[in-house]
Amino acid sequence: MYKTVADTAKDISMPEQQVMRYILEGRIHAVHDGEQFLISSDQFERYHEQLERIKEEIEIWKNTPIPEDIDIKDED
C-alpha cells in the first residue's frame, strides 16, 4: 500500500518537511505520480519493529535495580 508524505509523516511521528528531505536525499524510497510523492508503507515495517524493541529494552533497563557497589565501605 502506498501513502502520501503527510500520512507517512503522521504514522512515523516525524514532520512532513523531514520526510520530504529524506525522500530527496534518497533515504526514503518513493515514487512520484506526477502530482505528489507516494511512499510504500512496507518499508516502515522494520522501522516500527525496531522502535518497539528499543522501547522494550528501555523499560527493562529502567526496571533493573542498580547493584550495590562492593567497593563502598561504611565508615561511620
Image (cartoon, rainbow, N blue to C red):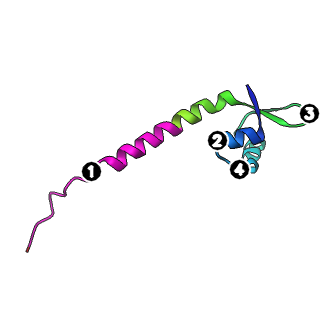
Q: Nearer the viewer, residue 60 or 28?
A: 60
Residue 14 on image: x %, y %: 67, 47
**How far is the residue under mark 3 from the one under mark 4?**
22 Å
11 displayed left or right of 31: left
**How far is the residue under mark 2 from the one under mark 4?**
9 Å
The mark that comes first in sequence, 2 or 1, is 2
Quick check: is 21 in the magenta stretch? no
Residues rendered magenta in the picture: 51-75
Q: Residues within 10 Å of mark 1 (few under 14, many from 20)?
A: few
**How far is the residue under mark 1 from the one under mark 3?**
56 Å
Q: Which residue is mark 3?
A: 34
5 displayed left or right of 43: right
**Residue 26 appears in the picture as rendered:** no
Amino acid at pointer 4: Pro
Residue 35 on image: x %, y %: 91, 36
The mark that comes first in sequence, 4 or 1, is 4
- Report the mark closest to the observer, 3 or 4: 4
The N terminus is located in which quarter? top right
25 displayed left or right of 54: right
**How far is the residue under mark 3 from the one under mark 2?**
24 Å
Residue for point 66% across, 27% down: 42
Amino acid at pointer 3: Gly
Q: Which residue is mark 2?
A: 12
Give the SS element for disc 1.
loop
Q: Which residue is mark 4?
A: 15
Give the SS element for disc 4.
loop
Q: Which residue is mark 1?
A: 65
